[in-house]
Image (spheres, rainbow, N blue to C red):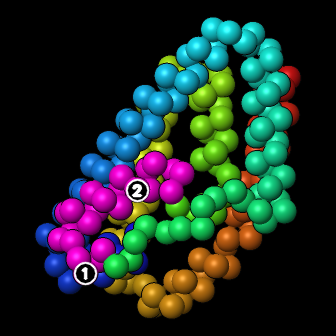
Amino acid sequence: MAGVAGPMLQRDKAQGSRFLLGLLTGGLAASAGLAALVYAAGTPISSLAPPRYRAIFAALVIAGFGLADLAGRTPHVWRQVSQRLVRALPPGRLGLVWGFDLSLLFTTQKTTSLAWAALTGLLLLAPSAALVALLAMTLAGTAAVAVRSASWGRQTGSSAIGDRRRHWFLPMRRGAGIALLLLAALTAL
């Protein structure tokens, strides 16, 4: 997203700002909808299954995500938000569509399984916290894009940024895998 918002902000601050506002608005809308689904599915699970069983099952699923990350097999759909929309939609609408798409979580590539672990925990252990947690994830993600985009003009170029990003994928995925295994162990206790 910073690869779109950064140049857009550099070229025209108003367009870049509309894109970021659309990204935030679309993301919050999708997060609220996803939270409603997590709450609707998780509430009956919470009332039917004892907390200890839910915690053990959540720990097993989260451990599976951690192992997947360590093996470099993070589960995701092999799809990114549509790049062709950059030229087809005005900045605000583009941000809205992309924000909604990204915050659905199921529709795009993932670098780590952290989002899946969060959904697992919310669904099985705290469905009533889904709205706050998913909105916070969207706010944090949009803030990261905004900060990265604002510094776009001081960077050395998009190809160098892409090279640095690829350089961090493996350590980031391994770190997430280890963190998820630790979280799974703590959840099972």
**Above or below for 181 versus 40:** below
At a point 67% along the width and 73% down the height, the residue shown is 168
Q: Which region is colored magenta?
A: 85-107
Residue at 63% in and 8% down: 47
In the figure, 120 relative to 19: above or below? above
**Sequence-wise first label, 2 or 1:** 1
The residue labelled by disc 2 is: 101
- Separation of residues labelled 2 and 1 (CA atoms): 17 Å
In the image, residue 71 lies in the stretch drawn in magenta: no
User: Is any atom of residue 31 visible in this view?
Assistant: yes
Left or right: 43 as drawn, with respect to 51: left
Numbered disc 2: secondary structure: helix
* Quadrant hosting residue 78: bottom right
**Which residue is the site of mark 1?**
87
Tell me which corner region of the image, top left, top right, bottom left or bottom right, holds residue 176.
bottom right
Find residue 89 and report its horizontal and vertical position in percent: 21, 72
The residue shown at (45%, 37%) is 34
Position in image of residue 10 (x %, y %): 25, 81
| Quadrant in which residue 60 is drawn | top right
Type of amino acid under label 2: Asp
Q: In the image, what residue type sits under mark 1? A: Arg
Is residue 182 left or right of 7 when viewed as pictured?
Answer: right
For image coordinates 60% across by 37% down, the residue present is 119
